[in-house]
Amino acid sequence: MLVKDLMTTPVVTITPGESTALAARLLSRYDLGALPVCQNDGRLRGIVTDRDLVLRCLAPGENPERVPIGDIMTRNCAWVSPEANVEEAAQVMAAAQVRRLPVVEDRRVVGMLSLGDLARSRTCEMEAGEAFAEIARGVRRPAAPPRRLKDPPGAL
């Protein structure tokens, strides 16, 4: 099976000069986890995820209305061709540790492929499972927070 048989179209995109606030609204409105960042002609420049918004804009205390997407996006992101087979796409996802891939043809975004798309396809369940396992191996879990000792009597 080919990527073009499973990819989602049309694609919601954003340009590098748009605000992170707009990206957040688009992610919410369309129930997305990632937006390809494209020039006006559709050429892929990067990708921004909901996690990028939190870690690179909100957590540092930046104003999302003033921070352009180009400042927080991931550049040189992984992508796949619509003519690639789904096994290759799953391998790209696993190697890049991502759950969503822009689908690019002639340097322009033509679709998005998610791990969920692979999992929903009966013929791709094994590839999706393997890709997810590979992605999960790369996830670093935070250490448990230190246990707080009981305050001594009379302590504030």
Image (spheres, helix red, strand yellow):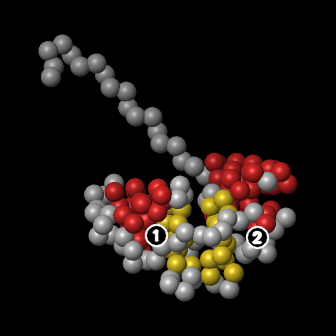
Q: Which element carries disc 2, helix, strand or loop? A: helix
Amino acid at circle 1: Met
Q: Position of residue 47 (x, y in %)?
A: 52, 69
- Disc 1 vs disc 2: which is toward the camera? 2
At a point 66% along the width and 76% down the height, the residue shown is: 110
At a point 33% along the width and 69% down the height, the residue shown is: 67
Estimate how packed mark 1 is, as few (under 14), some (14 to 19) or many (20 or more) residues with alpha carbons within 10 Å. many
Q: Position of residue 15 (x, y in %)?
A: 46, 77
Whether residue 130 can be seen here: no
Which label's residue is closer to the chain start, 1 or 2? 2
Which residue position is annotated with label 1?
Answer: 73
Estimate how packed mark 2 is, as few (under 14), some (14 to 19) or many (20 or more) residues with alpha carbons within 10 Å. some
Q: Quadrant of residue 124?
A: bottom right
Q: Position of residue 28 (x, y in %)?
A: 47, 56
Whether residue 150 can be seen here: yes
Which label belongs to residue 4? 2
At a point 70% along the width and 48% down the height, the residue shown is: 133
Q: Which element carries disc 1, helix, strand or loop? A: loop
Front-most of 5 and 47?
5
Q: Quadrant of the N terminus?
A: bottom right
